[in-house]
Amino acid sequence: MELLRRALPVGWEMTVATELGALGGFSDLLQYRFILVDLDATAFDPVEIIRAVRGELMLNLAIFCFGGAPAVRDAARLGRADRFFTREEIAEKLPAFCEQFGWGG
């Protein structure tokens, strides 16, 4: 996660959580610009997080995944994650995502 923190532009911050409830309720989640999901995570089921965001909460936040074995990536695709990157790629693209998804700030 430190690689991603270093890639954030000035003025942006990253919240790290292993469960959606830690980020707040539905209205709190709506304030996030996008969600990054580490598909190699062992502290939580990354595919279940994607399914919860899309299926249970029915949120249309952009979900960018990184890492993960091919089978996990396929499961995340079925869960309706948006894009997939290697760890290096996500760190390189993060500043552009922040600019693209920024709300004028």
Image: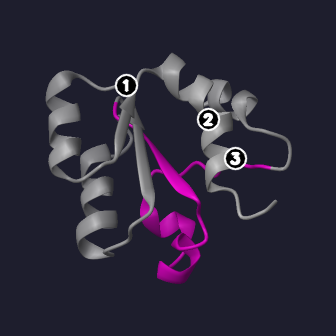
Residue 49 within the segment the image draws in magenta: no
Q: Name which residue lies at 69% across and 57% down.
A: 102
Q: Name which residue lies at 77% across and 49% down.
A: 12
Q: CA distance from mark 3 to mark 1?
A: 23 Å
Horizontal and vertical percent for residue 90?
Answer: 52, 28
Q: CA distance from mark 1 to mark 2?
A: 15 Å
Horizontal and vertical percent for residue 16?
Answer: 58, 48
Report if the CB atoms under discs 1 and 2 are less than 8 Å apart: no
What are the residue bounds of the magenta stretch?
Answer: 12-39
Callout 2 environment at 10 Å: few (<14), some (14 to 19), or many (20+)? some
- Secondary structure under the numbered disc 3 in the rendered image: helix
Relative to 53, say whether 26 is above or below.
below
Residue marked by disc 3: 99
Q: CA distance from mark 3 to mark 2?
A: 9 Å
Relative to 87, say whether 103 is above or below.
below
Residue marked by disc 2: 94
Question: In this rendering, which labeled residue sits more in front, label 3 or label 1?
Answer: 3
Callout 1 environment at 10 Å: few (<14), some (14 to 19), or many (20+)? some
Horizontal and vertical percent for residue 42?
Answer: 34, 35
Compare residues 62 and 28 and report the one nearer the observer: 62
- The quadrant in which residue 86 appears is top left
Residue 15 within the segment the image draws in magenta: yes
User: Of the residues under marks 3 and 1, which one precedes in the sequence?
Assistant: 1
* Badge number at residue 67: 1
Callout 3 environment at 10 Å: few (<14), some (14 to 19), or many (20+)? few
